[in-house]
Amino acid sequence: MMGVRAAVPRGAVRARVGAGTPSPHRRGPAGPGPSRHHYGEHMEMATPQIGRALVVIVDDRVTHGETQDRTGPLVAELLEEAGFVVDGAVTVPGEAVAIRNALNTAVIGGVDLVITVGGTGVSPRDVTSDATAGVLDRPIPGIAEAIRASGLAAGAVDAGLSRGLVGVSGSTLVVNLASSRAAVRDGMATLSPLVAHVIGELSGLETS
């Protein structure tokens, strides 16, 4: 069952919560805090054309320091090209509680868009979509299906077979992408023409 949240008007001051602070939207005990990376101080100073975005990388290997995050910088670059100021990226393990905590923290922090990368397949550790379902107030299945169809047509198999969701939590748009670079590039290309319209509606700037 989807939760009910009161949307906070754009421009209002929103409380930020730490990784270990329970939020009113969380379900279950707090998980381990995500690690955060910033991709350049200039992003914090820039004036957003569309809004603020955060990237959540779901990857056990990155979380445990076994490999470097090579996807976060790519997503951040594509988001900046689309007109977003990127607050940074957090990395979390493939655990539902940790993913929910990262999403809820972003929503309460007031970002306009959250992109998750990874954990959208069918293996036992692929729980991003399940965790996201517990956070969304309103799914937007049309965008999720468009990302799958485009990914499959482009040969990004993990994108075509992804269980990724797209929807709204409070006044934040949440998008799940598969983890391959091809899936990320194609997913962002499909998403970019649509996201400004969705965020405009959430901000009350568009009515159609």
Image (tube, rainbow, N blue to C red):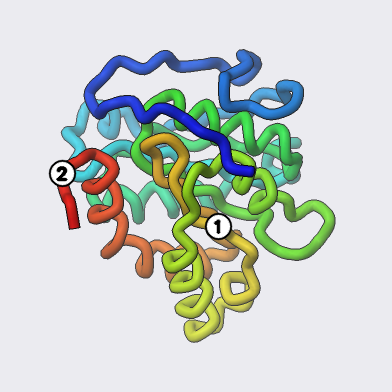
Pointer 1 local density, CA inside 10 Å: few below 14, some 14–19, many at least 20: many
- For the question of whether residue 66 can be seen, the reply is no
Count all numbered tags in the image, as a single digit. 2
Q: Secondary structure at mark 2?
A: loop
Which amino acid lies under the numbered mark 2 shown in the image of this protein? Leu
Which is nearer the eye, 76 or 126? 126
Above or below, 187 against 56 in this view is: below
Residue at (62, 78) in percent of width and height: 157
Q: Secondary structure at mark 1?
A: loop
Residue at (64, 53) in percent of width and height: 129
Quarter in which the C terminus is drawn = bottom left
Query: On the picture, is 149 further left or further right than 172?
Result: right
Which amino acid lies under the numbered mark 1 shown in the image of this protein? Leu
Which is nearer the eye, 96 or 57? 96
Front of the two marks 1 and 2 = 2
In percent of width and height, residue 30 lies at 71, 22
In percent of width and height, residue 140 lies at 45, 58
Q: Which image quadrant is residue 13 in?
A: top left
Return the residue at label 2. Answer: 205
Return the residue at label 1. Answer: 165
Say the numbered circle drawn on residue 80.
none
In percent of width and height, residue 91 lies at 61, 37
Q: Which image quadrant is residue 155 in?
A: bottom right
Query: On the picture, is 76 further left or further right than 166?
Result: left
- For the question of whether residue 31 can be seen, the reply is yes
Residue at (56, 36) in percent of width and height: 3
Above or below, 208 against 185 in this view is: above
Distance between the Cα atoms at labels 1 and 2? Answer: 24 Å
